Image (cartoon, rainbow, N blue to C red):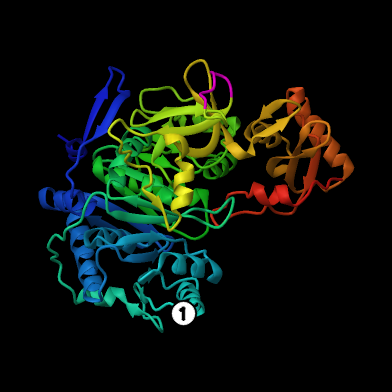
């Protein structure tokens, strides 16, 4: 029996499709002790982490080594007063120390706060103060320690700062401290419902919210890894994500190790599709997950043979049908989309055993009860757009769904209004049971009595040769209620003008139903985005409706 099966009950049909899934775990479940340490004890030489960087340095870590290094960090942190419930921020890019530090924090019962190294001083100040952070473990690179120190000084917060690998003025050297620490660490008491991880959202509609998950969160990602990403026992899974984002939890640690797959990590700063393919082939990656942006680049540059790759998945933004088709034609692998949020685990996906369809989110995870509802809270018929809502599990607990917002109880109650979790995302279900994404529920455009999802119009816009990036929003219109406006970044060879606007409108409107026609085009040099790269439609709606 595989280790993950100790914590779940699953029912699979003859095609290998997951039909039912539920969890079973002790009240003191802790991923660090009950998964990492158990594997280290029973299979000490099992491969856990394969790491390389752009300088051709590489390390392969076994579970025995992960246990030892995480124990050393746990001893260092405990010596400095870090314990159960304390909040520690990790700003470690794709350094392998992230995995050791994460497991160490879980063992201590401390709350891990992953953060991207791209944060500004103001971003750090907000997060450090909001979370009352007690310590920070950071990369020595890219001026990160200096920005953190400046942020701490600005808010008057006294927090311990550690850096890895190098001596940094004003910071302790964690690597040196580990060398002097014991590799043994006796189990500390923690509870499954204790807070384990705190992610700040990207803040598309306001200040970032602190999303808190408990120690059952890793178990919810068994479905993510096994049935969507199809990480295999003895395989090597590669998710392209920096550790500051929730996608790292989805694809670089919990579910993969639970189902027996090692994790591939490529430590890079500047994205190069050719190098990604080289990593896949050099190390024999068997399953791969990346945002659509990566696949667009791969298709554009031409995809070399990747003989070891058995499965490819994607999530996070719009996937163009042409990219889906070309990738599949060149590799023989269909791209399997998935959907979820920072607040959740995987909610919908093109799961193992089902044939993926380009553009479709797939079907509902058997782990969750999900419906599409209108603004009055009523279920919508097949074919109509509704908000994706999650119903509580039968026993009242819903593992994988966040346990609270940081110091925002009223906001937490609001998203759980009516006894269901409101994702704020819109979709519709077709006659075959597949779900199709239509953007944020609040982004749905009501024009002339019709409801239009921005996604479908953006999908057509991106086919115009002059459109590099686009965003579709609704703006006030006296006759229609709202008019459809396209905000467009042009490519080389195209200049903003009435002629270009007319060309884009004509190109798109010939392919769209009349009620979806673009009425206004605005040209911009760049889109307003969150630190995670998501377009802020709320900012665009507030900026007016100017056009050429």
Q: Is residue 359 visible?
A: no
193 on left or right of 121: left
- Which residue is at the far bottom? 169
In the rendered image, residue 97, in percent from the top left (x then y), is placed at 32, 64
In the rendered image, residue 13, in percent from the top left (x then y), is placed at 28, 19
Up-down relation of residue 212 to residue 359 (above or below) = below
The one nearer the camera, 504 or 455, is 455
Q: Report the residue at 40% width, 41% height from top.
A: 288
In the rendered image, residue 540, in percent from the top left (x then y), is placed at 70, 49
Q: Is residue 401 visible?
A: yes
What residue span does the magenta drawing correspond to?
Answer: 378-384
333 on left or right of 34: right
The quadrant of the image that shows the N terminus is top left
Up-down relation of residue 296 to residue 531 (above or below) = above
- Which residue is at the far right? 498
540 on left or right of 338: right
Category of crowding for the residue at label 1, using alpha-carbon neighbours closer than 10 angstroms: few (below 14), some (14–19), many (at least 20): few
The one nearer the camera, 298 or 306, is 298
In the rendered image, residue 548, in percent from the top left (x then y), is placed at 87, 45
Q: Is residue 381 magenta?
A: yes
The one nearer the camera, 185 or 312, is 185
79 on left or right of 286: left
Q: Report the residue at 73% width, 44% height from top.
A: 487
Q: Quadrant of residue 107?
A: bottom left
The one nearer the camera, 19 or 294, is 19
Q: Is residue 512 magenta?
A: no
Up-down relation of residue 420 to residue 266 (above or below) = above
Q: Report the residue at 24% width, 43% height from top.
A: 258
SS class, disc 1: loop
Count how many numbered circles sit on residues in the image.
1
Q: Label 1 belongs to which residue? A: 156
Q: Report the residue at 23% width, 73% height from top.
A: 76
């Amino acid at each position: 029996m595989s280790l993950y099966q100790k914590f779940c009950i699953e029912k699979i049909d003859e095609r290998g499709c997951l039909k039912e899934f539920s969890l079973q775990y002790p009240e003191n479940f802790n991923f660090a002790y009950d998964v990492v340490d158990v594997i280290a004890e029973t299979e000490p030489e099992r491969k856990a982490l394969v790491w390389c960087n752009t300088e051709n340095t590489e390390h392969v870590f076994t579970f025995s080594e992960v246990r030892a290094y995480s124990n050393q960090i746990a001893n260092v942190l405990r010596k400095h007063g870090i314990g159960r419930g304390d909040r520690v921020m990790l700003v470690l890019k794709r350094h392998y120390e992230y995995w050791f530090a994460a497991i160490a924090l879980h063992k201590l019962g401390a709350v891990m706060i992953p953060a991207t190294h791209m944060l500004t001083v103001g971003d750090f100040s907000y997060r450090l103060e909001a979370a009352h952070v007690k310590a920070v473990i950071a990369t020595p690179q890219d001026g990160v320690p200096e920005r953190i120190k400046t942020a701490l000084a600005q808010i008057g917060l006294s927090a311990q700062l550690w850096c890895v690998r190098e001596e940094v003025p004003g910071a302790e050297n964690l690597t040196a401290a580990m060398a002097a620490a014991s590799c043994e660490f006796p189990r500390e008491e923690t509870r499954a419902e204790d807070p384990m991880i705190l992610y700040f959202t990207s803040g598309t509609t306001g200040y970032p919210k602190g999303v808190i998950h408990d120690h059952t969160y890793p178990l919810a990602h068994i479905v993510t890894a096994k049935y969507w990403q199809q990480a295999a026992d003895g395989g090597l899974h590669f998710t392209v994500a920096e550790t500051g984002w929730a996608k790292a939890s989805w694809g670089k640690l919990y579910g993969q190790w639970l189902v027996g797959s090692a994790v591939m990590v490529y430590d890079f700063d500047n994205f190069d599709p050719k190098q990604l393919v080289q990593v896949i082939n050099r190390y024999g990656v068997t399953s791969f997950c990346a945002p659509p942006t990566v696949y667009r680049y791969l298709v554009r540059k031409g995809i070399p043979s990747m003989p070891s790759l058995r499965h490819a998945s994607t999530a996070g933004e719009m996937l163009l049908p042409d990219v889906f088709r070309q990738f599949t034609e060149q590799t023989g692998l269909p791209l399997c989309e998935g959907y979820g949020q920072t607040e959740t685990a995987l909610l919908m996906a093109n799961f193992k055993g089902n044939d993926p369809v380009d553009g479709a989110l797939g079907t509902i995870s058997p782990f969750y009860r999900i419906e599409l509802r209108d603004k009055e809270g009523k279920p919508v018929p097949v074919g109509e757009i509704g908000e994706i809502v999650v119903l509580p599990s039968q026993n009242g607990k819903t593992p994988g769904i966040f346990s609270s917002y940081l110091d925002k109880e009223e906001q937490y109650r609001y998203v759980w209004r009516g006894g269901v979790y409101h994702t704020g995302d819109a979709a519709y279900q077709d006659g075959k049971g597949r779900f199709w994404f239509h953007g944020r529920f609040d982004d749905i455009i009501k024009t002339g009595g019709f409801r239009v999802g921005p996604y479908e119009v953006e999908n057509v816009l991106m086919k115009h040769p002059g459109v590099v990036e686009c965003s579709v929003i609704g703006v006030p219109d006296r006759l229609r209620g709202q008019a459809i406006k396209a905000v467009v970044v042009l490519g080389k060879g195209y200049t903003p003008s009435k002629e270009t606007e007319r060309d884009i409108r004509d190109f798109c409107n010939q392919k769209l139903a009349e009620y979806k026609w673009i009425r206004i085009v605005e040209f911009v040099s760049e889109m307003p985005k969150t630190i995670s790269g998501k377009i802020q439609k709320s900012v665009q709606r507030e900026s007016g409706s100017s056009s050429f």
